Image: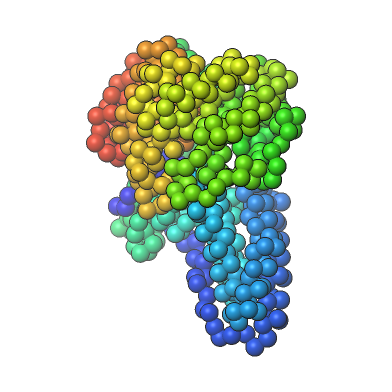
Amino acid sequence: MLSGVGVSPGRAAGPVVLVAEPPGEPPTGPPPSDPVAEAGRIGPAAELVAARLQERADAASGEAKKLLETTAMMAADPSLRTQAEQSVTTKQIPAARAVHDAAATFADALRAAGGYMAERVRDIEDVRDRLVAELLGVQAPGVPELTAPSVLVARDLAPADTAVLDPAMVLALVTEEGGPTSHTAILARSLGIPAVVAVHGVLAAAPKDLVVDGEVGTVEIPTGPVVPFAAEVTAAAVWNGVGALSDGMRIKVLANVGSAKDAQAAADAGAEGVGLFRTEFCYLAATDEPSVDEQRKAYAAVLAPFHGKPIIVRTLDAGADKPLAFLSPDPEPNPALGVRGIRVGRQRPEVLERQLEAIVAAAEETGVQLSVMAPMVATVEEAAWFADRAHEAGVTRAGVMIEVPAAALVADEILNVVDFVSIGTNDLAQYTLAADRQLGAVAALNDPWQPALLRLIAMIGKAANEAGKPAGVCGEAASDPVLAGVLVGLGISSLSMNAAAVRQVGAALAQHSEDFYRQVARAALVSHTPTDAKATVRAMVS
């Protein structure tokens, strides 16, 4: 039995199919006899790889299409190609090696930026591996054609691979690396495929068959062949669309969105509103600050499907972890602890003021019930500063995100100066456990079932209940239908998640009462490990 981090619930078993490994680091020699001709091979190879990725994108839809289009654009990026071509002629090295080195330069820059930009490192590495394989004339990395339902096992899955998985043929996913917020995790949940990541040793074990439990995070290597079976279909389809417990207590089931397409998918899934609108994703490529009118139009396109419903808009979570060119961020030695979120707003208050003006105008235009919150708040003083400016801009309900342990520890005082709080469990976990959420080696520490994280959430929930104000969760933890009940028992009044999880979570919450979920939460709080907490709660709700 091997253990990892369960990132998509469900139990399945079947024969193993290994995902083809990347070609590895190409040799530095021998020097090409004709450097100009050797450099000339890079352009056509890049165009071919980009075309193949675009073909996949054309056949996909939704999030998968967007991921594949992004990877295809990276493959066609002339800056990567130009740098590699120059290395061939100036350093006298083979084309494959030049591509490998050029990609490493870009990957290092993204990794140093941290956060959202660091998440693009896997995309660059995927493009690199496909280009190198093409130049070496070897098999491209990725998922082979499946002839029967199988369990896919890989070191890690590239976005271009996860985006085209067929749930009818993929029984489960198991990766040696990866974390709870990786592409593999997010897309596995959206496709309803059981998945366990960070399973150290699974490749060395070379299993022929596996039994995978994506809920508890275990991977069993059976002593003999197994009869393949797929995860059972959940009861999500029978949800009535109203976020409520069995005793009638209302718990809002909301969605996380970052674009108009996300918003429409959330509305189609039955989300009761939006618990997190990530505004910065509209402007990651902007070289100049968008005008108030440009922002208003972009925001209105996202808000439009939710006329008359509650929407929580997060102001720019920009800075070191999501650097925006028009903000001219300075280089930082530790971006995760640098000038980001509300800290950028305080340095550039005029940018915040223009954004608030655009948000209020878009809300009036679309008729939504607007709330606005600031990210990365650490102190009561920061919370009060933001609330004052939001109210002055015409925002009726102003709140803050709690993603820093310091804010959790003074949640009662923060709730004295804001109208609500929302917990970002992804960042709160990484800051509480001192574990980079992008690093597979510490993925187990970022498990949202960590007792320390649950105890901080309990503190926040208690403070909110005593203040008579709402506390929501908008991190990946909210998309787990079992953990959702624990969060309700800890005092959380709304849950916001990716669109694919909305019906499943809504249906799960309706199965039990508030009193029951309080008992479940107490059991999770006294557990010593995430595994114990999950097992205990799972036994109680089953």
- Outermost residue, bottom direction? 33
- For the C terminus, which image quadrant? top left
Q: In the drawing, does residue 465 fall left or right of residue 368? A: left
Residue 300 point in image, percent of width and height: 71, 27
Residue 208 point in image, percent of width and height: 39, 61
The picture quadrant where one finds residue 345 is: top right
Taking 292 as reference, is 461 above or below it? Answer: above
Q: In the drawing, does residue 62 fall left or right of residue 21? A: right
Taking 167 as reference, is 154 above or below it? Answer: below
User: As rendered, which of 485 and 276 lies closer to the eye?
Assistant: 276
Q: Residue drawn 68% across and 68% down?
A: 82
The picture quadrant where one finds residue 409 is: top left
Q: Is residue 269 visible?
A: no
User: As rendered, which of 155 and 454 lies closer to the eye?
Assistant: 454
Q: Residue drawn 58% across and 20% down?
A: 390
Q: Residue drawn 43% across and 33% down?
A: 403
User: As rendered, which of 301 and 219 lies closer to the eye?
Assistant: 301
Residue 77 point in image, percent of width and height: 68, 60
Tell me the colour scheme of the image.
rainbow
Taking 130 as reference, is 184 above or below it? Answer: above
Residue 13 point in image, percent of width and height: 41, 50
Q: Is residue 112 visible?
A: yes
Q: Residue drawn 63% across and 26% down?
A: 353
**Exactly how many numbered labels are in the figure?**
0
